[in-house]
């Protein structure tokens, strides 16, 4: 039997896929969505971005399920109910434009916006914790649905809206985890309709899934112990790294 017919066997792919899955699973329970946005672009260094997105989707679902089993009691339901409809609208837009917009273009735009957001936070420290108006939050959340659908890079846009609220680390992580669980679940039928699911991608996802519990445990341990100011400083670092990487991908 030729294993390469059913599974990606290139060692170089796994050198990138293993850290990508660990980063992604940690981001679901404590490391922050900024770092989580690195996972698909990192994998995209070895394979095409649409294929990377298809491989990561089943892994995302397992990450979400494991994370929510631990974080469910900490969800801010009022915030969740507001952002979810706009996120789903964004995924619908992503489905309609998937074949018309290059993922690298989306990555570049998200990267530039992420870096601009961080620059604004540093330049206006006095007003950095002032919550944004809800209409802006709705637009940013819809943008997250779109960028999440196209390149699994949904973390930065919604972070622009949520971070100024200065939620407790576990509340932030739980609410974002619940939001992205529903968003990721909504992608399955559209991805299948676009022909992104193949058995080779699916079996590769299964091979990577045993890494998820390690990342979830590490992220949960971190979120339950870290100080709030430290948590957000790490969030900013993750968003900076993700912003630079996404912008680089967009300019290639």
Image (tube, rainbow, N blue to C red):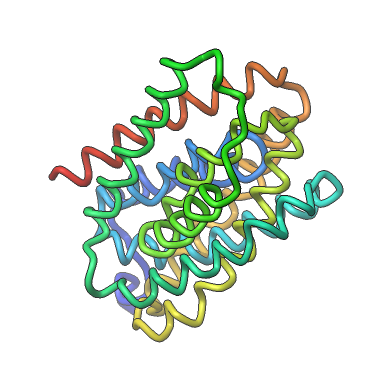
**In this rendering, position of residue 31 left or right of residue 2:** right
Q: Residue visible at 50% across and 61% down?
A: 207
| Residue 234 on image: x %, y % | 54, 23
Q: Residue visible at 52% across and 54% down?
A: 141
Q: Is residue 19 above or below residue 106?
A: above
The residue positioned farthest toward the right in the image shown: 73
* Total number of numbered discs in the rendering: 0
**In this rendering, position of residue 236 left or right of residue 15:** right
- Quarter of the image that includes the N terminus: bottom left
**In this rendering, position of residue 96 left or right of residue 136:** left
| Residue 160 on image: x %, y % | 50, 38
Query: Looking at this view, is 84 or 51 the one in front?
Result: 84
Q: Is residue 44 above or below residue 245?
A: below
Q: Is residue 5 above or below residue 174?
A: below
Query: Looking at this view, is 118 or 41 the one in front?
Result: 118
- Quarter of the image that includes the C terminus: top left
Residue 170, image quadrant: top right
Q: Residue visible at 76% across and 39% down?
A: 171
Q: Residue visible at 23% across and 66% down?
A: 101
Q: Is residue 64 above or below residue 54?
A: above
| Residue 193 on image: x %, y % | 40, 86
């Amino acid at each position: 039997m030729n294993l390469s017919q059913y599974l990606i066997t290139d060692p170089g792919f796994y050198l990138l896929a293993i850290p990508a899955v660990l980063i992604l699973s940690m981001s679901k329970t404590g490391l922050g969505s900024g770092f989580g946005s690195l996972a698909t672009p990192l994998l995209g260094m070895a394979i095409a971005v649409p294929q990377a997105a298809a491989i990561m989707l089943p892994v995302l679902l397992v990450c979400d399920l494991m994370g929510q089993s631990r974080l469910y009691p900490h969800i801010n339901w009022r915030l969740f109910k507001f952002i979810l409809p706009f996120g789903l609208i964004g995924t619908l837009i992503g489905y309609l434009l998937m074949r018309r917009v290059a993922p690298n273009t989306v990555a570049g735009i998200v990267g530039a916006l992420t870096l601009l957001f961080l620059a604004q936070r540093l330049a206006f420290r006095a007003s950095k914790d002032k919550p944004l108006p809800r209409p802006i939050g709705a637009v940013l959340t819809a943008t997250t649905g779109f960028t999440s659908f196209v390149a699994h890079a949904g973390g930065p846009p919604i972070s622009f809206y949520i971070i100024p609220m200065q939620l407790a680390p576990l509340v932030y992580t739980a609410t974002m985890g619940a939001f992205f669980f529903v968003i990721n679940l909504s992608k399955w039928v559209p991805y299948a309709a676009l022909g992104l699911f193949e058995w080779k991608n699916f079996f590769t996802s299964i091979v990577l899934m045993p890494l998820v519990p390690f990342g979830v445990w590490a992220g949960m341990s971190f979120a339950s112990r870290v100080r709030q100011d430290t948590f957000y400083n790490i969030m900013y670092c993750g968003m900076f790294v993700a912003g630079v990487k996404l912008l680089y991908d967009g300019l290639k």
